[in-house]
Amino acid sequence: MNGGTPYSIGELARRTGLTVKTVRYYSDRGLVTPVDRTPAGYRRYGPDAVARLALVRTLRELGIGLDVIRRVTARERTLGEVAAEHLAALDVQIDVLRLRRAVLGVVAAHGTIPGEMARMHRSATLTAVERRRLVDDFLHEVFDGLGDPARHAGPRRTLTPDLPDDPTEEQLAAWVELAGLTLDPEFRADLRHLVHTHLAELPADAGAPPRPGTIGLARLVVGPALAAGTDPGSSRADPVVAEFTARCALLHDRPDDRALRRWLLDRLDGMRDPRKGRYFRLLALINGWQPPRCTAPVIDWTVAALRVRTAG
């Protein structure tokens, strides 16, 4: 209102930043009501029209529909009620967008084929119960038939992903990628072989203190030589390899001979699948654990050293 004179549609448009067409449309929908008309039939609006249109504009920018806005301006609904409903709806939309982003992020980073992408999308949208069923099926195939279930309860826990109720984007992306691994029959078989190897190295007595397995011994014995830059094919590596094989002979109750070295070479070579290391890194991210130590350099050095000493 200017000096007591009601606003025209053009004046309202200038004061609110809306177009004349939009103001007229909102007026036709009952969101703002003229208080008078000129003799020529032009609408005139009162002093509250500017504030009302500002509210309408803000609510529209927040994605609220005109029918709901009309009920708010008519005092049929409170702003608090409407805000709460739309907040809940936005939370759902945000969750959906985060899932889509996780799937697309994995595809962009690693590439995939259409069938795999559809599978990843399904795994991203699983409920907590469905995720648990998928994980249980995966672990059952990995551990089934490998002896006393009580004996592998610990290893099973260390392989179990547990996605939080409110995961980060990184955890969601990790879950999508990990779920793809768990559905791969070849990876399941490879992990089952790794678990079987690990269980065979556990003490027969469940109450016995833990001891390093083959990988643990490699870290312990080979790690310093690797850090020192020792060439695995050099004579300087001979005592390192000798100590490693001697300890492995005790661990596996086998003679420390050429056959043991070939057996260790085959076993360690089978652990070099990068997907296994990737699984454990994804698992740590999902569960909020410390990232696992990378064993690839130690294994690579040990495999190279053993290969040189078993050639021919």
Image (cartoon, rainbow, N blue to C red):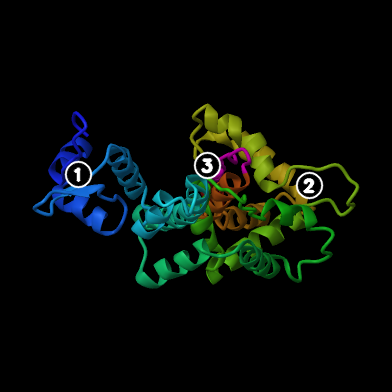
The mark nearer the N terminus, 1 or 2, is: 1
Image quarter in which the N terminus is found = top left
Assess whether residue 44 is covered by the magenta stretch: no
Q: Position of residue 117 (x, y in %)?
A: 40, 66
Q: Residue furthest top?
A: 228
Q: Nearer the viewer, mark 1 or mark 3?
A: 1
Q: Is residue 45 left or right of residue 126?
A: left
The amino acid sitting under disc 2 is Leu
Query: What secondary structure is found at the residue carrying circle 2?
Result: helix
Kind of residue at disc 1: Leu
Identify which residue is drawn at 50% across, 58% down. Answer: 176
Disc 1 or 3, which lies upstream in sequence?
1
Residue at 77% across, 52% down: 154
Compare residues 226 and 143 and report the one nearer the observer: 143
Number of residue marks = 3
Distance from the alpha carbon under mark 3 to that under mark 2: 21 Å
**Front residue (pair 117, 28):** 28
Taking 127 as reference, is 155 above or below it?
above
Front label number (1 vs 2): 1
Q: What residue sits right under mark 2 in the picture?
A: 250
Residue 161 x %, y %: 63, 54
Write the start and end of the magenta stretch as one range. 288-302
Mark drawn on residue 18: 1
Q: Residues within 10 Å of mark 2 (few under 14, many from 20)?
A: few
Q: Nearer the viewer, residue 172 or 223?
A: 172
Q: Residue at x 39, y 49 (%)?
A: 73
Above or below: residue 289 compared with residue 43: above
CA distance separating discs 1 and 3: 71 Å
Residue linked to disc 3:
301
Q: Nearer the viewer, residue 307 or 12?
A: 12
